[in-house]
Amino acid sequence: MRLLEIRQLRSVIRTPDGEARVVDGVDLTLGRGESVGLVGESGSGKTALALSILGLLPRGTGRILPGSSIRLRGEELVGMGEGGLRRIRGGAVAMVFQEPMTALNPVFTVGDQIREVLRAHRDLNRSERRAEVARLLREVGIPDPEERAGAYPHQLSGGMRQRAAIAMALAGRPDLLIADEPTSALDVSVQAQILDLLGGLQARHGMALLLISHDLEAVARVCHRMVVFYAGRVMESGPAREVLSRPQHPYTRGLLGSRLSLRDRRRRLRPIPGEVPEPESWPGGCRFHPRCAEAQDLCWRKEPGLHGMRGSPGGEGPPDGAEAGEEDSHQRCWLARGKGEGVP
Amino acid sequence: MEGGAALVLWIALLALAAARLDRVLEAPGGALDQRLALLTLVLALGAVWWWSWVGVRGGGLPSVAGRGPGSGILPGGWPAFRKNRMAVLGLWIAGILYLAMLLAPFLAPFDPLAMPAFHETGDAGMRLAPPSRAHIMGTDQYSRDVLSRILYGARISLTIGLLAVGISITLGTFLGAVAGYLGGVVDAVLMRLLDMFMAFPSIVLLLAVVALFEPSLPLVVAALALTQWPFTTRMVRGEILALREREFAEAARALGFSRFRILLRHLLPNALPAVVVVATLGVGNAIVLEAGLSFLGLGVPAATPSWGTMVDHGRAYLLDAWWVVTFPGLAIVLAVLAFNLLGDGLRDVLDPRQGGRAEP
């Protein structure tokens, strides 16, 4: 049994222009202790996927369509009552948000906020809680944890705040940590530190990590597997390093081409033209075809399915506990399929 | 320093209260006024105790030593408040008025209700006597000492102001929080009810309510609270609506806290600064409204010394005896000014949107 099994997840958010299918038929599995990176542009539905797992789509306007399935340790989360979800949120599944300034409550000390999570999800007495707060703060690399526990969020730097937010997420001893763009709001100098911290914690605790980012290299640094997301669908997935070094889908190549690189200064920046379409009006055929330079007739007539490429060379071995097969690469492109099938 | 002074003040207050409880409780307004006096005494003791505790513990209001001033609720902290001279002035005036009201039985040179008969004073000279050494603010048409009546009147005005605001703030915060957080039908129904209340000018609503019943102190308090709660409710609802969209509210949901807990622990404390400001400004407003009611003869029972009543009774003699009207009038102005200054100052310190909150 995998830790998290998402099958045919479709989530919609009601907008004035109609229902937007922000997540549209996604399959995703995470083994225990596996780390998966979810990459894509803003508006591609990455955050909606994460919020769907926790049942946190906007109340009133967002919902998961019937037929979807999200199983955590075999337990179905779709359709689960608020009480059950509350037990899981912050417990088995915790989340770290993008903006550490606004994700912490400004009127309480970070120690208070961590204690509150401990009170909600763990059975500890006063002195144990106190010790645990200090231990958690130390674990996320905050110096002087006893003293810093008494600091208010505005008294900490951005990086320290994000570390405190990670400590809060760890407080419930989650099996799965979802980090939604955890470094985007931080100084460049701090980004790598936070990524390494997340990677280290993931390895040390045997915790699964779902890292949402638009930065492919950041994901490759921390994650075993990478899933490229576009217009509510998975476009490509596979071992992180392999996707980075041998991207199959034109969209993935486009993402890589839009990166600034110091190593290769002469390389021309090739941004993807256009923008992510509005979720109310995903294009027919391949959802990427209006922006794809290699698009052909077939691409706008018929949408390709996710196509597996078993035993792709160069991939690293699966982490402990992950079944073979999950490590396979998949892509959703007619062209790559032709090439992929040509190469044994 | 500060803590020590506060501690001494607290001990002095306590000793005074213990030694002369009978005089503290000696209240012209009857049993209810007596209870109010006791309540204010307890509150004052509590406040001073808190002040001294904070002072003794070190370094003003809560802050993390060496890491810049201010707690989360008080971003600028005590130092920022102290820099605002007008607010500090308001705090002083309000504090002095409060003390005067508490200690009225000791400070008042005469019985505020005593109407000396002609045979006691020998002649009619004590009626409308101008300010003199014995009667610093003169006497009124019944030969009562104006200063004494103003001091006792402070009890009525301030307690009515504080109680009315206390009730309306409690009610308003609760209803506003519920409406803002639950939204939907609850919100719609509450807001329409509120619109109905707000459609009436406060003073008209106030007059209508008060005119229906026998004038009494609790009635005035209730009527004032009734006209004030819609404003608090509106404001708190707006705050909660804005706060619940903030990321920390979502983060709190992602950590598995219940809705009630999120509202109580995460949203309300963040709305508190605005509530404090509205409450402080509301006290000034309530004092004016009470004075207006009493001026129209619809406030507290006639014999009770109240600033509004004094102005009302004295206005007939305005040309012959200016002091009867002027001093209570000044008292009203001073009290309202104090609370408005304090409220404005608190807004400057507490409300980050008005600027002044420096990023660390």
Image: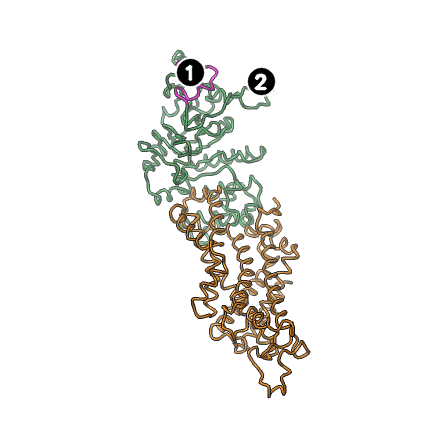
Which residue is rendered at x = 56% and y = 81% of the image?
B114
Q: Which residues are magenta?
A: A283-298
Main SS, magenta residues: loop
The quarter of the picture where residue A157 lies is: top right
Q: Residue under circle 2? A: A267
Q: Can residue B107 be seen here?
A: no
Label 2: chain?
Answer: A
Q: Is residue B16 visible?
A: yes
How crowded is the residue under tag 1: few (<14 C-alpha within 10 Å), some, or many (20+)? Answer: some
Q: Label 1 amino acid? A: Ala
**Vertical arrangement, residue A54 with respect to residue B116, above or below:** above
Dot 2 and dot 1 residues touching (CB under 8 Å): no
**Residue position for label 1:** A336
Q: Is residue B3 left or right of residue A41?
A: right
**Image color mode:** by chain
Q: Position of residue A314 (x, y in %)?
A: 44, 19
* Colour chosen for chain A: green
Q: Residue at x 46, y 36 (%)?
A: A204
Location of residue A78 by image quarter: top left
What x and y, as percent, mark residue B58? Answer: 61, 58
